[in-house]
Amino acid sequence: MLYQLYETQRSLMEPFADLAQTTAKAFNNPLSPLAHLPHAQRMAAGYALLHRLGKDYEKPEFGIRTVGVDGVNVAIHERVELDKPFCELRRFKRFSDDPATLTRLKAQPVVLIVAPLSGHYATLLRDTVRTMLKDHKVYVTDWKNARMVPLSQGEFHLDDYVNYVQEFIRHLQHAYGNCHVMSVCQPTVPVLAAVSLMASRGETTPLSMTMMGGPIDARKSPTAVNNLAMNKSFEWFENNVIYRVPSNFPGAGRRVYPGFLQHTGFVAMNPDRHLTAHYDYFLDLIRGDDESTDQHRQFYDEYNAVLDMPAEYYLDTIRIVFQEFALVKGTWEVRNPEGKKEPVRPQDITTTSLLTIEGELDDISGSGQTRAAQDLCAGIPAKNKKHYDVVGAGHYGIFSGRRWREFAYPEIRSFILAHNKVEATTQGKALKGIAA
């Protein structure tokens, strides 16, 4: 019922948000009589702020058109490589007509970036993708909004997430011989499970795994997010945050953890920070500080765009990762596509190198939570394992912004390059064509 009430309220607010935007423009337009009234700039700023507080935020675009590679602008074509019911494997294909640049592009490593399915869209990793494209062939998991997935597609569990990751890895291995995998936040757990299962079966595993700011062992340095998941019962989550999608969406009737509830939780973690940010936006509009107002819009266009998570997946994550700690205790079993349960044994991984990265000031995944993968992956030789702490970085700072670009990324680039042991025949095959 709450979801239906929210959608009704949102529908009622939409015309008022549009009206606020129109009014703001009227007070701002020098040809409008309203622009010459006293305090017109303040009125325009106030209505502009009302518009942003009341508008509906759709899924943003990645919007990556070009990247610079050694001083040469390379065109980017974004396309869907694989389309699954709950996820698209998205490729960012690079094009160049410069022979020297093309040769460099073709020889670069292939990286699968597994984005979080934790409230925001994969576009939250835009800066991650854009930076990685300078030195890598990049694929990313673009998770779908569960309210847009019809009930006929069935349920989506954490096991299905693990199976998706394995399928995407095999797809890239078939195309390139092998690949590297990079996971940010929540997917560190299912990615480690996916590679573990492949190793246990004797399959070829990725050349390297990079795990950033994830809850591998949520018992270490628990944060407010961890404490909520650990201190509330499983039944509390099932009864208080799970609702059915209203009838005006393709996924009508599907059980989900709604995006609007998640967004409320995000804001509630730092309400003062968001209140200050919006007030500063209002003042910047009055001052005509276009650079600051653009930065505010870009951030909140991304931050306010949220998706619904499948209830089964969300509840599985609460139980397995944050309450039972099944991965670190060695009790997790994943159901494969054939319906058979397989134990997750990270110690079986021997040929995949491991890099773990944490932010010094991370308030989502505390210190030591990601590093725990180093001990779990006991079968990986010490020379093929590395941990790196990004000094001064919070959770988002390890994959976006200045600290990501200047500190975290150089470590990742060097680690991937050092462990990029792709067969020569595969590299030769990949050198054909005009794109990478």
Image: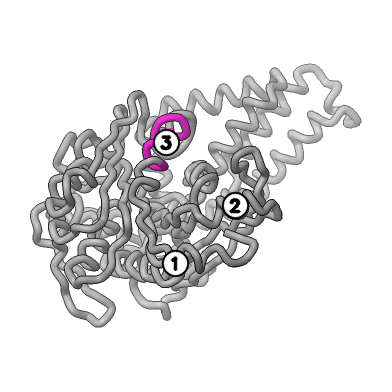
Q: Residue 351's quadrant in the figure?
A: bottom left
Extent of the magenta region = 404-413
Q: Is disc 2 surrounded by few (<14), some (14 to 19) or many (20+) residues within 10 Å? A: few
Residue nearer the viewer, 179 or 113: 179
Look at the numbered disc 2 and give the secondary structure of its residue. loop
Is 234 magenta? The answer is no
Mark 2 vs mark 1: give the one in front. Answer: 1
Q: Is residue 398 left or right of residue 290?
A: left
Of labels 2 and 3, earlier in sequence is: 2
Residue tagged 1: 426
Measured from the top left, where is residue 353 in percent x and y? 26, 51
Q: Which mark is residue 410?
A: 3
Which residue shows up at 45% across the image and 30% down it? 406
Q: Are marks 2 and 3 in contact (CB under 8 Å)?
A: no
Check disc 3 and report its element: helix, strand or loop: helix
Residue 254, horizontal then vertical, whole percent? 39, 70
Residue type at mark 1 is Thr
Can you tell which mark lies on residue 61? 2
